[in-house]
Amino acid sequence: MFFCADAASLMSKWLGESERNVSQLFTKAREVSENGQPAIVFIDEIDSLMGVRGEEVGGEVRVRNQFLKEMDGILDKNRKFHVYLIGATNKPWVLDEPFIRRFQKRIYVPLPDVKARMDMFQIYSQNLKFQNNVDFAELARRTEGYSGGDIRDLFQSTQIKVVRDFFQRGAANDLNAIPDPITMEDFETIITGRRPSVSQNIIKRYYDWDESFKAS
């Protein structure tokens, strides 16, 4: 069974409620495991829960301690829990080191390469119409450094451009009219005005962190 949570769903302004939410999450996962079914707990933006900050309130410290306690529980060699914790973060360098050490695997997921970008193009191009001059291989080459979110935004922005052109030429008044197929020129117009959202400085920071803490 898959359990998905984030800071917004676990944190509470009420005293003790956040720790209780964390405890209940892992309790449910252990119950599933004890019934013979593996349980996966996925925490998105885990740095919001386990990051070290200059100023912390008591609730944040208690939540972090509760997480560490729960992680120690599922790593107990004397008890066979098939409970797996996966955490995702864009800022691994803010994580508390005792927390990092409890992850048996620490994997840096790089930006998508050419093949991955081509696969994304196939996914995002479903249900869209293209002219024959659209060259996904060339687009994959020109989108070096783009993240998955950048690829998604590229397709959304290109489709919006086509729809905008459709309205601007007054075709919307014709009930039989439909937007033109997306052309290579439409993609090129959007790419010209869109840069990758991940800078080289950030990529280097990821690489440096991975060199210090990786455990693949």
Image (spheres, grey):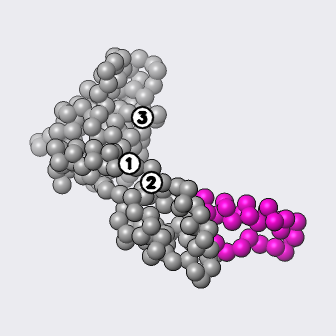
Q: Amino acid at mark 3?
A: Ala
Q: Amino acid at mark 2?
A: Pro
Q: Which mark is residue 69?
A: none
Q: Which mark is residue 199?
A: 1
| Nearer to us: label 2 or label 3 | 2
Mark 2 highlights which residue? 196
Residue under the point 34% across and 49% down? 200
Tell which of 132 and 4 is nearer to you: 132
Residue 161 among those drawn in magenta: yes
Q: Residues within 10 Å of mark 2 (few under 14, many from 20)?
A: some
Q: Which mark is residue 7?
A: 3
**Is residue 35 among the parts visible in the rendering?**
no
Q: Residues within 10 Å of mark 3 (few under 14, many from 20)?
A: some
Tell which of 13 and 179 is nearer to you: 179
Picture coordinates of residue 32, whole percent (x, y): 33, 48
Picture coordinates of residue 213, whole percent (x, y): 17, 44
Is label 2 in a helix, a strand or a loop?
loop
Q: Residues within 10 Å of mark 1 (few under 14, many from 20)?
A: few
Residue 75 placement, left or right of 150: left
Residue 215 vertical placement versus 175 (above, below): above
Going from N to C along the chain, the mark reached first, 2 or 3, is 3
Going from N to C along the chain, the mark reached first, 3 or 1, is 3
Magenta segment: 157-182
